Amino acid sequence: MGKATIEDVAARAGVSVATVDRVLNARATVRPSNLKRVEAAIRALNYHPDRLAARLARGREYRFCFVLPEGDNVFMTGLEREIAAHTQHLAADRVIADVTHTDVFDAAQLARTLDGIEGYDGVAVVALDHPRVREAVNGLVARGTHVVTLVSDVPGASHSHFVGIDNSAAGRTAATLMGRFLGNRKGKVAVIAGALALRDHAERHFGFLQVLGQEHGHLQLLPVREERDSSPRAAQATRELLKQHPDLVGLYNVGAGTDGIITALREQKHRRDLVVIAHELTEASRAALIDGTLSAVIAQDPGHEIRSAMRVLMARCDRQPLIAAQERISIDIFLRDNLP
């Protein structure tokens, strides 16, 4: 038997094609008895509507907006490249995606950016976990815009989905790697973050603290430094840490700014014994793995994240279920020996 059509569903349910269309698109009230018959026919025939064909027939296109941090975050630049590439791939599906940059470390500014978004079917935002941002997300949803959070979540907001890795697990992974690299060596371990108000940074930091405190008590953890994912600030923080703590044995960079850390470390040729773990595989972190400046990199696939965000927004617009396994973003661990 071939693929069921909307006409097959209408015939089995004993209703008109227009009634089936109203049920599928929730465009008008349908009598409860007809609704039940249509839903039963859809299940019986395993009917899956051709959403693209319906969109083309109505001259419908989907417009999405990605809200990304401003600044020199190399990983975010990679995300933007993936947005452009995947939007071009989806051109035949009538999907348009724009990018807006804002200061995601400033809750008021990020909220104002979200409040000002109009004319989009879906928004993907790298979000700050703050009540003002949560309300801005809720406002978008209330106005009929589908919202997904990207990389960093806002728990409690009424958004559709979070696209990103399990950041607590990523932090625990970093601590386990740190402990294994250091073995029985004693000394201090430093942590540099962008901002703990970012949920992904807070969760990574928490996971790191959990494992390091419970399993590696011989290591002393220094207070976290928040450097707004800025390479120059991260470089200066690294220089200060090396100067102030001669017994520093480990450094974990929770967020971006790794380029600056690498620069500062290469200035200290006598400190090649320092175990340094960072996030995201970039040209700079790749080179630093190869020359031994970095010990390990924990990464997430930016292409997978953008494709996932697009799929989720399209599915929400089309009222289609998600395939959970397809949208799960994995945690990758890179050493110099397994670089792709």
Image (spheres, grey):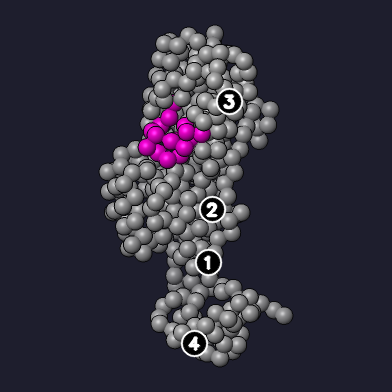
* Label located before the other in sequence (3 or 1): 3
Query: What's the amino acid at mark 3?
Result: Glu
* Mark 2 → mark 1, Cα distance in angstroms: 14 Å
Closest to the observer, 68 or 164: 164
Numbered mark located on residue 320 in the image: 1
Q: Position of residue 210 (x, y in %)?
A: 51, 31
Of marks 3 and 1, the one in the foreground: 3
Residue under circle 2?
308
* Label located before the other in sequence (2 or 4): 4
Of marks 3 and 4, the one in the foreground: 3
Q: Which residues are magenta?
A: 192-207
Closest to the observer, 142 or 61: 142
Asked if 329 appears above or below 62 in the picture, the reply is above
Residue under circle 3?
215
* Mark 2 → mark 4, Cα distance in angstroms: 37 Å
Residue 331 is at least partly visible in this image:
yes
